Amino acid sequence: MSVFPENFLWGGAIAANQAEGAYLEDGKGLSITDVTQCGPTRYLDYTLEVDPGKYYPSHEAIDFYHTYKDDLKLMAEMGFTVFRTSINWARLFPTGEEDEPLQAGIDFYRDLFATMHELGMEPLVTMSHYETPLALTKKYNSWASHEMIDIFDKFARACFENFGDQVKYWLTFNEINNIFKAPYLAAGMDVRGMDDFMPLAFQAAHHVFVSNAKTVKLCHEMLPDAQIGCMLSLSNIYPGTCKPEDVMAAYNARRRSLLFGDVMLRGSYPGYGWKMMRDCGVELEIQPGDLELIAQNTCDYLGFSYYRTSAFSDGDSQVFSTAGGVGHENPYLKASEWGWQMDPLGLRFTCNELWDRYQKPLFIVENGLGAVDTVEDDGSIHDTYRIDYLRDHVEAMAGAVEDGCKIMGYTWWGPIDIVSAGTGEMKKRYGLVYVDRDNEGNGTGKRIKKDSFEYYKKVIASNGEDLA
C-alpha cells in the first residue's frame, strides 16, 4: 500500500523562459533572460540589449508556445495530475508598466491552463520565475526599487482576475533566496561593477517580502479557495566535519536561505537575520506598515527545489549554482556530469528540517537530473541514470511522508528537455521526453520518449508504490 495520500499531486515543472520561445511574438516584451546567452557565466557576462549577431537560447527555446497542446498530451500520458509552469510577466505587460495586460498573452495562458484541465492536470503557476521585464531592470534596477511593489501588485491582480477561475495553486517568486548570489537571475538586478551589492540585495529582498505579503493578501481576498506559496532553492548543506566551527559555519550558511522562509512563512525577520544585516553594514529602509503586512500575510505552503547537497566548513565561501550554494565536495557522494552531488537521503533530511521548522505543507516543485543523453540508432534513449535518480528520490520522499512530513506533491524538473537555467544549454537534459535541439538551436524539435518516461508513468500509476 502506498504511503502517499490519494490526492497526492504527481507531475512535472518547467519555466516559461526556458520552454516557450516566441520571445517577441504577439507583443511580448523582452525579459531579463532574453539577453543572456549560453554558457556558465551567462548571468555575469551579459548586456541589457539583444545583439543580432549572437544566439540567445530563450528566443526559441523548445517552442512550447506553439507545441504546448501536443507536449501536454505527453505529460498526460504519464498520468500527471499537476503541471507547473510560469507566466512570463513580459507576455502580459511588455515593459511591466502598461495600464492593461495584453489580450494575446491572456488568451495564450487561458488556453494553456484549459488544456491542462482537459487532460486531467491542475496548473501550478509561478508568477515570477526569472522573467522580470527587462525594461524594469533598465529603469528601476528592478527590485532594488520600492516602485516594484506597486508594479508587481498590478501584475498579480491581472493574474488573479484573468486566471483565478483556472488556477488554484500559486507560487509568488521562484528561488528568491538566490538574490544574494545571483541578483540578476533571481531579482532582475544589474550589479555589475559594484564592489559590494549586499546592502542592495537585502533592501531588494525586503521589497520582495512586502510584495509577497501583498500578493498573498490579494490572493486570499480575490480567490479564497486558492492556495499560494513561496518557492525557495533549498538543496542542503552539511558541516564539512564535526569540528564545532565547521558546524556553526554550515548552520549560518544554511540560514542565508532559511531567512527567506522564516519571513514569508513565519511572518517576521528572525534575530539572526538582523545580525546578518548588521554584519553587512545594512540599514533597511522600512516603510510604515511593512512589518505588519508581512506578519499578517504569510504563505500557505512552501514550494522548494532540491537537487543536491554540499559540504561547508569554516572559511569556505559559498559558490553559486542554480542547485543552491556550494561549499566543497562531500567524499561520500557521487556527482552528476555537471558536478552536482546526488544525495537522495538528503531530500528526506530536508523535508524533515522544513516541516519541523514551519509546520506548513511542503511541495517539492523541482527535483531532477541534468545529463547528456544518447539517441540510439533505433531512436531509443536508455537513461537508466535518470531512472535511478528518480527512484531514489521518490523513495526518500516516501520516507519523509512516513516520518510525518505533510507533502502536497512532487513535480519532476524538466519532464521535457528545456533550456538549462544555469548554463543555457540544451545538452544538459532533464527531460523524460527528449527534444531534438542542440546548444546552438539546431535540430528538428522532434519529441522522443526516453525509458524514464515509462518508468515515471508506472510510479504515478501506483501512487509511488511501484519503484522497481
Image: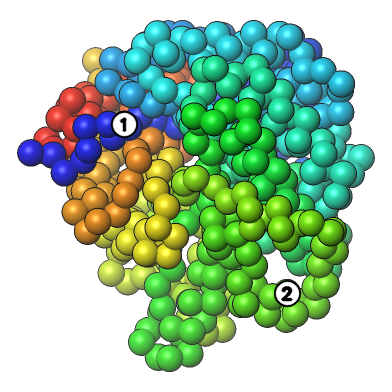
Q: Are marks 2 and 1 in contact (CB under 8 Å)?
A: no
Q: Residues within 10 Å of mark 2 (few under 14, many from 20)?
A: some
Q: What's the residue at 82%, 18% (across, down)?
A: 100
The front one of 37 and 21 is 21
User: Is 445 left or right of 268, judged from the image as shown?
Assistant: left
User: Is 13 left or right of 172, judged from the image as shown?
Assistant: left
The front one of 433 and 259 is 259
Query: Which residue in the structure is indicated by mark 2?
Result: 277
Looking at this rendering, what residue extends furthest in the left direction? 1
Residue type highlighted by circle 1? Trp
- Residue 419 shows up from this direction: no
The front one of 203 and 406 is 406
Q: Is residue 66 above or below residue 121?
A: above
Q: What's the residue at 54%, 55% (across, down)?
A: 265
User: Is 279 left or right of 38, judged from the image as shown?
Assistant: right
Query: Which residue in the structure is indicated by mark 1?
Result: 10
User: Is 31 left or right of 407, judged from the image as shown?
Assistant: right
Q: What's the residue at 51%, 53% (across, down)?
A: 233
Q: Earlier in the sequence, mark 2 or mark 1?
A: 1
Q: Quadrant of the C terminus?
A: top left
Measuring from the top left, give residue 461's x and y in whole percent. Answer: 18, 25
Measuring from the top left, give residue 222's x and y in whole percent. Answer: 63, 28
Measuring from the top left, give residue 333's x and y in whole percent. Answer: 30, 64
What secondary structure is found at the residue carrying circle 1?
A: strand
| 3D distance between C-alphas at marks 2 and 1 | 39 Å
Q: What's the residue at 31%, 49% (across, down)?
A: 406
- Residue 77 shows up from this direction: yes
